[in-house]
Image (spheres, rainbow, N blue to C red):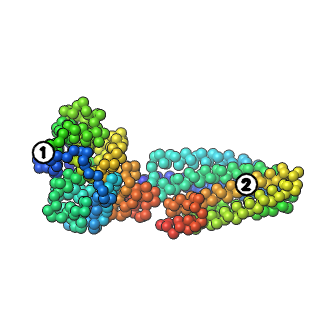
């Protein structure tokens, strides 16, 4: 498949003119409803195409709430495409079409007319490379809320998001500094804080540590472990050890198909499928 | 994982199997030393235990090195864990063989021929169990491992008979207690060897199926067989 990778380098990113998501007028962070259903996102016989090429083929997969689900597989297996479908980011890719169903909280998000802007607020995304806006640390976190007319306490919202992203202690005295002054790992946590500030229910993470050093990676992994208490996390990663360390469920994809999904411990000790076994032990891929 | 790792893992497995072969030999020699009152064989067993000890350390070091450097998963992880556990069992078996061999100078042949004939039966069964366990470790076939597990009951039964006979004979002829203690020592060490052989067989089931069948007896071994893939 053609694994479409957008340029997420910090220097090239500008704050988008049109909102990708919409903030509720007033909502204190403490009132965020916790998911009640076990399954937050469910793909049913989902196929995703780039032109005539099927990047994702007939995938049926459930994402349980308050768990970290990792999607692993070799380059081009369709894992990022599947992830991006979960908040309709594939809409921005020309010639991308889909077949089958993809439910978020029981609503088919691929249905024509579904509110993708609201979906992206509920299902946030963190990209491979940290992509802060060329603004202050404070404005990076507050931006989404402020452009949507958030009427609550913005400072409280920013502090809360930065605390949840385990960044507050490091930046509380320099909130007006440029986000670009932060290290790569701090920038990535800032991006997580930015996503959290929109009060999502699900966080999609597309290789969030691939551009970070081992120390920064460990910080993000610790953070993911804490975030699952409040959010449902779907993590795409090339790093199998990372999937093993941070996720409770692991899905293995190969050539667009979902080969196996199971508890992470089982996937990495006694996978049921030979292709999974061969991939995780490095016999192919 | 790289082809290099696969080669290293295979080399380690073969090295562990060679150690298993050596230990199997020591057990057989120790039984011969006791039952044939062969002091030379007994001496040989004690000397060669040093080889086993050295090999145990080398293999353990290699397992730790591979775990640290390659962080294996799946069947590779199961195999490495099994090599580490079997390594420990083999070293303990060799120690038991030394304990048996050291009784060769003391055991009274008349006692072995008389009231404690069961001990003579126990020796070959234990040697056979260990041989099957090592074979299963080599082939990694669950059926081979199960044969070992089925033999364990026979050894336990013989050991129980010997203990009961010892108690009875010691009360009748307390002056022979030193000789009876030699018998007890040999029986106990053979029974321990059978236990370690069982451990190895159970580890083979784990490496093949991913199921931990320890402490679950034979019915669950059957379950593991049906789930292997």
Return the x and y of residue B187 as percentages of the image width and height.
75, 56
Q: Quadrant of residue A113?
A: bottom left
- Residue drawn at point x = 29 percent, y = 58 percent: A40
Q: Is residue A150 above or below residue B229?
A: above
Q: Mark 2 highlights which residue?
A: B188
Decide if residue B193 is on the left or right side of residue A104.
right
Q: On what subunit does the disc labeled 2 rest?
A: B
Q: Quadrant of residue B216?
A: bottom right
Residue B17 visible in rendering:
yes
In the rendering, at what x and y percent does residue B147 appear? 62, 67
Q: Quadrant of residue A257?
A: bottom left
Rendered residue at 87%/52% (across/down): B174
Q: Is residue B136 left or right of residue A195?
A: right
Query: Which residue is drawn at the image coordinates 22% and 67% (left, top)?
Result: A99
Mark 2 secondary-structure assignment: helix
Q: How many angstroms separate mark 2 from mark 1 (CA)? A: 81 Å
Q: Chain of mark 1?
A: A
Q: Is residue B36 above or below residue B143?
A: above
The label number, if any, that marks residue A149 in the structure image:
1
Label 1 element class: loop
Q: Position of residue A245 (x, y in %)?
A: 40, 49
Closer to the camera, A164 or A76?
Answer: A164
- Crowding at dot 2, Cα within 10 Å, few <14 / some 14-19 / many 20+, comes out as some
Residue at 79% x, 54% y is B183
């Amino acid at each position: 498949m053609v694994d479409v990778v957008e340029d997420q380098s910090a220097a090239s990113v500008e704050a988008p003119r049109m909102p990708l998501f919409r903030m509720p007028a007033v909502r204190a962070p403490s009132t965020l409803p916790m998911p009640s259903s076990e399954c937050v996102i469910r793909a049913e016989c989902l196929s995703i195409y780039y032109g005539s090429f099927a990047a994702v083929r007939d995938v049926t997969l459930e994402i349980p709430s308050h768990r970290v689900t990792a999607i692993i597989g070799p380059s081009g297996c369709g894992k990022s495409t599947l992830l991006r479908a979960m908040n309709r980011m594939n809409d921005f890719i020309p010639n991308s079409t889909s077949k089958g169903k993809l439910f978020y909280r029981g609503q088919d998000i691929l249905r024509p007319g579904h509110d993708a802007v609201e979906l992206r607020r509920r299902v946030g995304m963190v990209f491979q490379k940290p992509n802060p806006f060329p603004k202050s640390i404070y404005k990076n976190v507050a931006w989404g809320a402020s452009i949507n007319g958030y009427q609550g306490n913005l400072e409280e919202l920013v502090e809360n998001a930065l605390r949840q992203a385990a960044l507050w202690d490091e930046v509380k005295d320099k909130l007006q500094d440029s986000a670009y002054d932060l290290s790569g790992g701090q920038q990535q946590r800032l991006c997580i804080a930015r996503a959290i500030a929109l009060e999502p229910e699900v966080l999609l993470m597309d290789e969030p540590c691939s551009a970070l050093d081992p120390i920064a990676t460990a910080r993000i992994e610790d953070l993911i472990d804490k975030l699952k208490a409040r959010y449902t996390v779907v993590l795409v990663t090339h790093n199998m050890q990372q999937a093993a360390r941070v996720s409770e469920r692991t899905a293995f994809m190969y050539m667009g198909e979902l080969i196996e999904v199971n508890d992470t411990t089982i996937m990495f000790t006694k996978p049921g499928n030979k292709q999974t076994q061969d991939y995780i032990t490095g016999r192919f891929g | 994982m790289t082809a290099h790792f696969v080669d290293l893992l295979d080399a380690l497995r073969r090295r562990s199997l060679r150690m298993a072969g050596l230990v199997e030999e020591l057990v057989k020699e120790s039984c011969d030393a006791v039952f044939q009152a062969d002091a030379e064989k007994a001496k040989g067993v004690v000397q060669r235990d040093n080889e086993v000890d050295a090999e145990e350390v080398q293999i353990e070091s290699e397992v730790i090195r591979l775990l640290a450097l390659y962080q294996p998963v799946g069947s590779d992880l199961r195999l490495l864990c099994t090599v580490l556990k079997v390594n420990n069992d083999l070293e303990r078996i060799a120690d038991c063989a030394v304990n048996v061999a050291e009784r060769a100078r003391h055991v009274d042949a008349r006692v072995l021929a008389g009231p404690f004939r069961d001990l003579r039966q126990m020796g070959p069964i234990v040697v056979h169990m260990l041989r099957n366990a090592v074979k299963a470790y080599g082939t990694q076939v669950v059926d081979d491992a199960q044969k070992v597990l089925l033999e364990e009951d026979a050894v336990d039964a013989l050991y129980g008979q010997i203990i009961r006979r010892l108690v009875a004979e010691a009360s009748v002829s307390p002056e022979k207690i030193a000789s009876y203690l030699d018998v007890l020592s040999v029986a106990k060490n053979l029974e321990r060897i059978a236990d370690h052989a069982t451990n190895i067989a159970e580890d083979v089931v784990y490496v093949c199926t991913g199921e931990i069948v320890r402490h679950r007896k034979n019915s669950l071994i059957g379950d593991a067989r049906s789930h292997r893939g």
